[in-house]
Image (cartoon, rainbow, N blue to C red):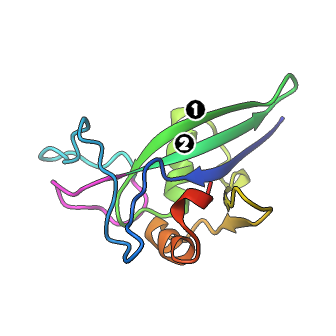
Amino acid sequence: MSTELTQVEYDRPLASSKGMAAAYLDPTLNHSLGPGAKSRLSVGTDRPPGGLDRVLRVFHYFESNSEPSTWASNIRHGDGTDIRGIIQKILDIHKVRFVSCFGLRLSRRQCEEVHWLHPDMGVSHVRERYELKRPQEEWR
């Protein structure tokens, strides 16, 4: 069985062309944590109660003995979340072990440009590094 988590795409424009401070927050979601509650992502810097989450759309590709399948998940994360935390969150949902066997990549839709993301890299660093070079709509 071969499994790979691959493409990452923000599901809404998260930043204006002049800066990286904007983020899409779904108005139907409760973005604050209640007293004593912990973030569902335990990796990365813990946010104080009331901290805001961002929404990241992650596309999954899974190959098994039958046919490959594709689906997407909306993953909530905080400012201190790293790539390993995103991978861990996805694998926890599907009760998958062996986290070190999985990776995340960022690819451009218009060409063959692909970037494998280091597990220790923060999501905010990924946004700064790649969204400044190309419009957000080009990345998956």
Answer whether residue 45 is magenta in the image: yes
x, y percent for residue 113: 76, 66
Dot 2 amino acid type: Ile
Residue 92 vs residue 62, the one in the foreground: 62
x, y percent for residue 96: 63, 37
Q: Residue at x 37, y 68 (%)?
A: 16
x, y percent for residue 3: 76, 41
Q: Are marks 1 and 2 in contact (CB under 8 Å)?
A: yes
Q: Is 65 displayed left or right of 47 in the figure?
A: right
Quarter-of-image position of residue 109 = bottom right
In the image, which residues are magenta?
42-54
Q: CA distance from mark 1 to mark 2?
A: 7 Å
Dot 1: element: loop
What residue is disc 2 on? 90
Outermost residue on the right side: it is 65
Dot 2: element: helix
What residue is disc 1 on? 94
